[in-house]
Amino acid sequence: MSSPADSGTTDDVGRGEPLIRVRNLKKYFNQESGLLSGLSFDSSQFPPIDVGQQRVKAVDDVDFEIRRGETLGLVGESGCGKSTLGRTLLRLLEPTEGTIDFKGQDLAEMSGEELRQKRSEIQMIFQDPQASLDPRMKIGQIVEEPMRAHGMLDDEGREQRAKMLLEKVGLDPHHYNRHPHAFSGGQRQRVNLARALSVDPEFIVCDEPVSALDVSIQAQVLNTMEELQDEFGLTYLFIAHDLSVIRHISDRVAVMYLGNIVELADKEELFENPQHPYTRALLDSIPVPDPRERDARGVLEGEVPSPIDPPSGCRFRTRCPRLIAPERYEWTDEEWAHTRTFMRAVKRRTFEPMPAGEFRQEFFGGDLPRGEAGEIVADAIDLVATDPGDGSEERDDDHDDWEEARELLLESFARESICATERPAYEIQPEYGTDTHFAACHLHR
Amino acid sequence: MSSEPLLRVENLKTQFFTDAGTVRAVDGISFEVHEGEIVGLVGESGAGKSVASMSLLRLVEHPGEIVGGEITYRGETIFGLEEGPDGELREREDMLSNEAVRDRIRGNEIAVIFQDPMESLNPVFTVGGQLREFIELNRDLSGKEARAEAIRMLREVGIPDPEERYEEYPHQFSGGMRQRVLIAMALACEPSLIIADEPTTALDVTVEGQIIDLVDDLQEKYGTSFIWVTHDMGVVAEICDRVNVMYLGEVIEQAPVDELFHDTKHPYTQALLNSMPRPDRTVGELEPIEGVMPEAISPPSGCRFHPRCPDAREVCQRVHPEPKEVARADGYPHNAACVKHDAFDVGYDESPPLEAEPRLTAGTPGGEDGE
Amino acid sequence: MGLLRYTLYRLLQAIPVLIGITIITFLLANLAPGDPVRLMLQGQEVDEELIETIEQRYGLDQPLHERYITYMSGLVQGDFGHSIHRNQPVSDLMLSRLGPTLLLVLSAYAFAIATAIPLGIFAATRRNDPADHISRIVALIGVSTPSFWIGIMLILLFAVQLGWLPSSGLVYPWWGPEAYDWIDTWPELLYQTARHLLLPMVALGTLQMATLMRVERTQMIESLQGEYVKLARAYGVPERTILRKHAFQVAQLPIITIIGLNLSTALGGAVLIEYVFNINGMGRLFIEAIQSLDYQLIMGITIVIGTMFVIGVIITDISYAYIDPRVTYGEEE
Amino acid sequence: MAIGESQGGGESGPSKEVEAKFGWRHTITKVKDDTTARWGLYVVGFVLLISLYTLIDSNLSRLTLGAISDFTFAEALPIFDHPERIPPPGEGEGHLPPAFHADGSMSYPLGTDPNGRDYFTRIVYGAQVSVSVGIVSTLIGFVGGTVIGSVAGFYGGKIDDLLMRVVETVYAIPPLILIIVFTVFVSGGSPDITYAILGVGITFIPVFARIIRSEVLSIREMDYIEAARASGVKNRNIILRHVIPNSFAPVLVYATLQIGVTILIVAGLSFLGYGAQPPTPDWGEMLNVSHGYMHSNVWLSVWPGIAILITIMGFNLFGDGLQDALDPRLKN
């Protein structure tokens, strides 16, 4: 009977040293499974059946490390791939590519019994405190299950440890024999904590552990998690969508968008000196609980693109308010700003067709950009305007013209930008603290 | 404050009659909504805020029932009881009939926006069709005009390409877009009051920002009043003019938003604010509220917050405080239901503090005595 | 994908199922202990040579997979083989029997749908009232009673005791009045058809009615609890419109699926009902074939009835897709 | 019923719904409290008792193999021990109407069958046949389906694909027809009740497999399964300790309802002469015999049908009640 903490770990990692190194990690999902999967109809060919697999790029080429004893916050909006990343890290999902170096061993390479044994060192806490506890088991059994799976202690020892842990997480050990349904949400989350701690792990992935809880209960659970981290020397990957919670609990923070990490820095640095436009947009959007600071505003336009076919280069470029001007044209900043706005308005069709003159007035203050860019814009305006420049008759079906204008603008401008042609990855000098500040934005080139 | 309020709620009580007993979900709340303001109704889950807001339209579902109080909208009685000749309560003469509430109030005068944009739209009808139906029903417009109006409203709430999207089905819209459709529905009926029940809770933070932005703009343009039901103090600070804080079926503090945050008068509100992590600054240690909210089936005696209150004294166990004016700001009263204020004068200062029972942070299981 | 493409997709999906039906039927009929010819002769003393001649003539001496390939190559050309017992092509035998079965099953369905849906809605809106309880009990009896016994009871009451309706046979409208010497005009023919059809239709339709009614009630109750119903109420939509339009449309979706899947029970029930009421449909033909162990005919009938079911399910799936836009557009955003 | 707020995972203590849903003890309490389930239990219990009694008390071989004419209920139940119950010999064709009829006799409460056997006794003994047919063939389907369904559902992949194809195909052939074909061919042209039971059971294996598979699939997605995997629990233990206990309840409901369906199908089978064979006292078989006497003795066709109706209704009531108890969503 040996505690898993000292089994098989020869190279002990010192506090502050990287415990986990993730390199080029990718997780793609096939859209559906089954005999006819991958079959889809495509009327543009004959026979109208397409056998190509569409793959959802949930996590696409991610690099980072987690240091022993720290809490790395992972924040992003729904669908950005943060939960998938957490689960892939734990090998609950099979990585498509990449390595997960945990204390010198690659988790991505492990499988079967070897992986199962390794699970005593890495644990997970789930978002839904109710769904993550088997309703038919008693909380004592639930807490003991991982110990049993790893052959830790004997029956009596397990019970003692379970009771000890229940007390540690702030529950009454006398409730050992109760079913989860007798507990409130916050208490159930504490049972989850006790279960995760039972095998004395080093690393815990916390997937939105407090987002299902009320504010006042959130604080209780967060405090307990911090106390446990100190006491047991735990390392957390804390996944959340709530920036306030992230700011409170993390040491360093990674921001995810559409399968990529766009920024990673020390907490203070990230919140006080955000360098990626997406991080800024996120921070600007959070409502601050102070009526004297009413600045939460929807700074972002449009919607997150599909992860099946994400934008090239920087994934945020299709919504970025600071999309970099393509270099092959000569612009002033103002001209580019106008063109960018116009391009996106055409793409999203947010306006009614109007005469060309009105377009110029509304989007360009009357003056089109000079040179080649201006000509392209003029062409695009002609396509969508109600009075086509070539003097031909009024058109009735404008659908194709919209498409054409859209393609013209995107092709000439959006896809010419460095944001579309190169994937950004830069290290910046931090203003707060000394740690590195990673920002995936070409503004820092 | 001088003019007659748009909506006046007095001592509203809504109860659910279940097998386990009577749940006093809303237990005697009073508040007002004036023209053109956004009034917040804030509280944690179980506070009774959603039931309260649905009671305003008399849309409480079985086995719930409004059992007391008065709801007056522009001089009309949406709900009101009086004592009959035998002392029993009966509906007042001037209380609107079910048909009148349905035809004249719901949609026409008071519209709602629900929390869950995924479930609130009917999956088998087009977005435009649903919007048009509500417009036709609540405004004097022909089918064609209603359609034009529906498209105009879709554009107004920022839905790209509204003509095409009019013909699409809800599942083709993202969550944020669906919430915009619900806002369009509410505004298109040209009501004077919109009840927004957690309208941004299900949304991502950037989308939430977009929606708050939109509501702010549209509210300014149309002058509609809002009751904004939420659990998020951040959203309250962002958008509300005046706020009612609810705890266990009661309003425990009501104040203009700035006073509520910067001159907090009720220990619960204060505790709630202290327990929140903040996005704008790093908080060293959070101060959680002890214990959990008790069930509305058997609320604690005296002040309902006293078992969790850091300021609780012996008197709090005995005296049940109604909200009283403890300060004034901008011509609005600042009410709090806490006996520590002088306005109550029940001997709080002399009363001995309650012994803090040694307890584990999480308390006993919610099931009380277990199985 | 559009409705047309969805239809194509469903048809494509049906192919493996249809092949599966032929495999199962073929295996059952051919893997039986004893060979088909001997089985058919049912122990009669026959010259061994004669048996061999018959087997050779019908290719029964070939290995199993070759026989299957032969059978299938005939099948795709519409040739169901030859009934040894009746010395007739199987397809000829089946053709004249299709009509009565279709008429019976479709009318039973019409009866079931026409009664179940209003009753189910009625029960849902009067939840836990006496009316609801009564309709639930009726539905419970409906799903617990063998259809053939209902048929017998109906005959005993309406034909034997009261003498109001005929107890057996069917009048086929597609034969025209001239086929019957006791019928002169078209209206009279249709009237007679209805009179003959009434009892078997009710007998076969009762189970369907009861099943549909239970589902309808549950679905309506669930649909009426939907957020969209709450929203409609909050916008002052009259309760009747909510019931008929908002809640009803959504509640119909599972009903359509059930209607399709229950076709299986109805087709099976038709065997019993045709037997009780002496109707010359596929079901009776099936019993006759089974009695004489006419294995070519049995295979033919099983495949045709299986195909009827598959077609029925495809039709209901397409109507589902027609009502529910989520099917054809897919769920992705 | 959502009192208070709809925002997820509240702190106001566990909701009643959740409490109702879990734990066997809760289920049993719920069943006891549910009127429908209670009545179902009474009826099922009554029918089971009768069949158990007849099973223990009588010599089964006499019922199925030997002639029944010399055996009466009077022998089985001593309290009814009246010598006049033994049918008068040679009275085979002149069968008696029920007791309330002018020509009836109290010795034969439901009259006699065309062979002069006491109809009441036969009806009572029929319970045994129907119940055992229903339970045994459902059990075959249940066991076979559980094994195939849980393996396919948990592991997915190719096994799962293959299973679904087979299920779809079996679904496409109406069960009655498939079972008749099975019974007749497999028995080599001489069907009897054993083949019928086997046929029904095997036909329903894919049906059960499908139900169990979908149940397992939904449970596989639950967080607590993922939690167990993340803790390093072995797959076998996950299936044994989490998947099966949690999928068992809904499948049990389905099985209860399926017993009714099975009895219905076997009755039809016997009615056509492809199930129980004479002289087995099976209700379907009795209806088959009485069909020939429809005009001369109406009552012969009435009683077996009522017996079938009551039995199936019992199982359906019980299944419905169980469902309500396990899934309180539609209650109240």
Image (spheres, rainbow, N blue to C red):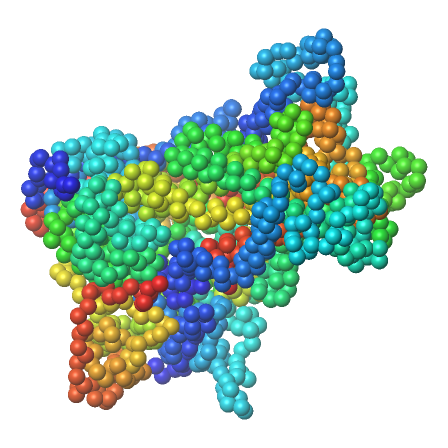
* Front-most of residues A155 and A295: A155
* Front-most of residues A185 and D90: D90
Quadrant where the C terminus of chain B sits is bottom left
Residue sitting at x 69%, y 54%: D81
Q: Quadrant of residue B144?
A: bottom right
C155 above or below D270? Answer: below
* Front-most of residues A15 and B191: A15
Q: Inspect this view and state whether residue A348 appears.
A: no
- Which residue appears farthest toward the front when viewing the image? D83
Residue sitting at x 71%, y 10%: C48
Residue sitting at x 49%, y 33%: D164
Quadrant where the N terminus of chain B sits is bottom left
Left or right of D275: which side holds D169? left
Q: Position of residue C91 (x, y in %)?
A: 73, 24
Left or right of D180: which side holds D228? left
Q: Position of residue D207 (x, y in %)?
A: 53, 38
Q: Quadrant of residue B333?
A: bottom left
- Which residue appears farthest toward the bottom when viewing the image? B85
A137 above or below A442? Answer: below
Q: Inspect this view and state whether residue A147 appears.
A: yes
Q: Quadrant of residue B283?
A: bottom left
Left or right of C50: which side holds A109? left
